[in-house]
Image: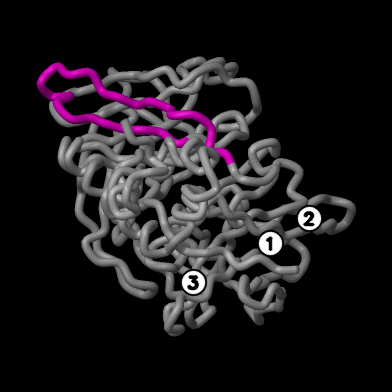
């Protein structure tokens, strides 16, 4: 029997191109030749394309999940849920970097296509991470103190589409109540920070959930010049390095309601809105058109949640949409609102479909967060 090292190179590549994403770490550590192969751009593109075919065939998708300050790869398959099949939400093990990232507590994960921007729990470092290639770029940062109070920056990742090869950048900012706001750009190619000249007439909360779409970032923002709009959608364009116009949401938002963003199909936004009273009605809307200065919406799902959960989802939560199965997965804690002990995924679909999946014990003061993940062969340049 031949071993792998004696097989023709093209046959070895064909075999390894079918390795699941979750087995990459083991394959890389098997031998130097395989590790080198998984860094080859031609091969990685083939492997990513094959992985996409397999997930489509299995009618499932892969997500990144942040639980208890650790990042996991998660397999999600809701096929057949309306025919009494059990949903599959399976964490496939911690995402492990080739350096010390897997030993660091991560408080936030922001996804920009196949790259992740992680903020460490102590807020002293940012990490740009390509989990597929196992590459990282560490950036030291510091919180700012204003009148002896510690303020934290919002950090997001995007790219300039005007360049032949996308130029990735980090936007960081902090809005202070009695001080001038600060907005800065970090360019990965030049390893340098610079200040943006921005005078905002809006405010983005540090806890506001942000989403990357086509290289730009979207948030909910409070319009400080309007008395009748509590929250609106706001975009930062990484190509022009400017914030766009205020974009309308498809509903009115009142105090204490739940509202959060998610990406859908890489080119659309989705928003979850839940009432804080009465039947706790929840709506999911999807964009039919989305640009930095223009948006239109279509309703995807509407459900009365009081008979199902009896409580309102926390605004720190996140959600994923399965269009084919007309369902949504909401990540939150259990129903013991004041002292939860378990992380839960709530699967909600048409015609009253509802299931809960236990994701394990809560061991830290953090909410479970999840986002779609599509691997990327984008190389992260290392700086001396």
Quarter occupied by the C terminus: bottom right
Q: Which element is circle 3 on?
A: strand
Name the residue located 49 percent from the left edge and 29 percent from the top edge: 93
Numbered badge on residue 174: 1
Q: Is residue 94 magenta?
A: yes
Q: Nearer the viewer, residue 150 or 112?
A: 112
Q: In the rendered image, which residue does mark 3 sit on?
A: 159
Give the mark nearest the N terminus, 1 or 3.
3
| Residue at mark 3 to residue at mark 2: CA–CA distance | 24 Å
Q: Is residue 34 left or right of residue 383?
A: left
Name the residue located 34 percent from the left edge and 53 percent from the top edge: 9
Image marks 3 and 2: residues in contact by CB distance under 8 Å = no
Residue extending furthest toward the right: 148
| Residue at mark 2 to residue at mark 1: CA–CA distance | 9 Å
Disc 3 crowd rating (10 Å Cα; few below 14, some 14-19, many 20+) is: many
Task: Tell me where the magenta segment starts and ends, as one range.
Answer: 73-96
Q: Using the rendered image of the protein, determine whether residue 211 is visible from the camera's viewpoint.
A: no
Give the mark nearest the N terminus, 3 or 2.
2
Numbered badge on residue 143: 2
Disc 2 crowd rating (10 Å Cα; few below 14, some 14-19, many 20+) is: few
Disc 1 crowd rating (10 Å Cα; few below 14, some 14-19, many 20+) is: many
Give the mark nearest the N terminus, 2 or 1.
2
């Amino acid at each position: 029997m031949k071993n792998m090292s004696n097989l023709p190179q093209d046959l070895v590549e064909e075999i390894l191109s079918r390795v699941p994403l979750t087995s990459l770490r083991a394959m890389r550590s098997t031998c130097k030749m395989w590790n080198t192969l998984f860094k080859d751009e031609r091969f990685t593109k083939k492997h990513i394309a094959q992985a996409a075919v397999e997930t489509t065939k299995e009618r499932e998708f892969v997500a990144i999940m942040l639980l208890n300050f650790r990042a996991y790869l998660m397999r999600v398959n809701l096929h057949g849920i309306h025919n009494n099949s059990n949903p599959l939400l399976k964490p496939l093990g911690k995402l492990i970097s080739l350096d010390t990232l897997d030993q660091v507590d991560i408080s936030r994960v922001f996804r920009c296509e196949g790259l992740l921007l992680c903020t460490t729990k102590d807020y002293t470092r940012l990490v740009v991470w390509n989990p597929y290639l196992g590459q990282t770029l560490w950036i030291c940062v510091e919180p700012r103190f204003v009148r002896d109070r510690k303020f934290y920056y919002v950090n997001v990742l995007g790219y300039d589409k005007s360049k032949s090869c996308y130029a990735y950048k980090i936007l960081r900012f902090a809005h202070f109540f009695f001080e001038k706001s600060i907005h800065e750009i970090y360019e990965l190619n030049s390893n340098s920070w610079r200040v943006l000249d921005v005078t905002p007439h809006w405010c983005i909360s540090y806890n506001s959930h942000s989403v990357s779409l086509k290289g730009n970032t979207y948030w909910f923002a409070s319009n400080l010049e309007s008395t009748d709009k509590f929250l609106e959608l706001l975009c930062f364009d990484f190509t022009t390095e400017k914030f766009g116009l205020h974009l309308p949401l498809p509903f009115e938002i009142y105090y204490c309601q739940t509202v959060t963003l998610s990406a859908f199909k890489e080119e659309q936004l989705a928003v979850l809105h839940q009432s804080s009273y009465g039947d706790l009605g929840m709506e999911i809307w999807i964009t039919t058109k989305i640009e930095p200065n223009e948006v239109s919406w279509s309703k995807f799902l509407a459900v009365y949640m009081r008979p199902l959960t009896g409580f309102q989802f926390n605004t720190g939560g996140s959600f994923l949409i399965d269009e084919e199965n007309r369902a949504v997965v909401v990540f939150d804690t259990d129903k013991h609102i004041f002292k939860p002990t378990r992380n839960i995924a709530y699967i909600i679909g048409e015609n009253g479909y509802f299931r809960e999946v236990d994701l394990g014990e809560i061991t830290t003061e953090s909410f479970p967060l999840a986002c779609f993940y599509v691997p990327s062969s984008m190389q992260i340049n290392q700086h001396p």
